[in-house]
Image: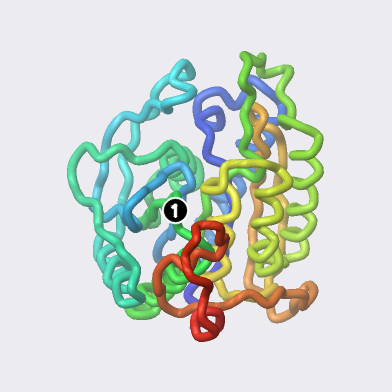
Amino acid sequence: MNNVVKGYVLPGLPHLVLTPDANPGWKKVRQAMDRVRDEITALDADVLMIYSTYWPSVIGHQIQARPTPEWVHVDDEFHALGSVPYKLKVDSELAHAYVEAAKARKLQARAIDYHGFPIDTGSVVVSKLINPQNKLPCVIVSSNVYADRAETLVLGKAARDALEKQGKKAVAVIVSSLSNRIHTQKTEPKDDHIHSLKDQEWNLKFLEFLKEGRLEDVSQLSRQFHKEARVNKVANFKPFWWLAALMGQNNLYAGNVMEYQPIYGSGAAVISLTPSDKAARDLEFDESDPDSYSGERNVLGGTGEPALTQEALHE
């Protein structure tokens, strides 16, 4: 059973909710998000599984489990744009199952369930735009700032475990920009542009891969993207590791780049990935594929610790 009927890569800056008409490109991204809303409404899905790079965690992985979190959100960087009231509907049962599935794969995870917990900007923005009436409940998972590739892959597999155990079908959503360097000086909406030419070039390369449905290739090239575009690692390569592990680590997707524009210097793309029987290209790389987390393996070296054993290298 394929438990993920569709995947999306979506931006999460508050401009899309509060000031979409201030820039023609922002308006186009907002309109693409509206089309995503319509697509999701027509899908046979039970839940939105959201991985938000706007929700960083330090110790383990946090999973939102409060049935109806409600508050008024103000973005910490763009507070001048205004506030966004929200009330979400969370699949609490699935959230707790996700926590248990993560622990079963030796990850550290916990459920978040208390009034007033601040839902992150990305999750609020995406929920307001693609699921405004809460027709589908959601589950939101944080992005651990220290998690490596192995840990993030296992986190994605745990999400798949939880879905399979409960027999539910999901729409998988990662909330992230491509390049995410924003302007450091006040920039008028009419003058918005991608922060640098290098960011633009690498954004276009990633979009080329995703348009061809090459999710696994993007997952395995994410470190190189981080190096070349010099962007925050939480916001760029981790979500593609999670999405690939959840949807299936292959290139068997029909990709659709619905829109791509700058939002205050960052690369905002609206992308859909639909499971397909035909691979765009079978060009996956050959990195390890762990099923459970066995701890940090010092893959970067330079700490003076002993070298990895052959057994560890083949985990």
Residue 254 position within the rendered picture, expressed as x and y whole percent measured from the top left:
71, 67
Q: Which residue is mark 1?
A: 146
Type of the residue with mark 1: Tyr
> Is disc 1 placed on a helix, strand or loop?
loop
The residue lying at 59 percent from left, 49 percent from top is: 236
Q: Residue furthest left?
A: 114
In the image, residue 184 lies at what x, y percent? 61, 21
The x and y percentages for residue 39 are 58, 56
Quarter of the image holding residue 275? bottom right
Q: In the rendered view, does 194 fall on the left or right side of 70?
A: right
Judge whether residue 44 can be spotted in this image: no
Asked whether 292 or 270 is in front, the reply is 292
Q: Residue at x 50, y 57 (%)?
A: 303
Count of picture labels: 1
Q: Position of residue 119 (x, y in %)?
A: 34, 40
Residue occupying image coordinates x 48% and y 19%: 81
Q: Residue at x 43, y 36 (%)?
A: 121
Q: Residues within 10 Å of mark 1 (few under 14, many from 20)?
A: some
The relative height of residue 106 versus residue 71 in the rendered view (above or below) is: below
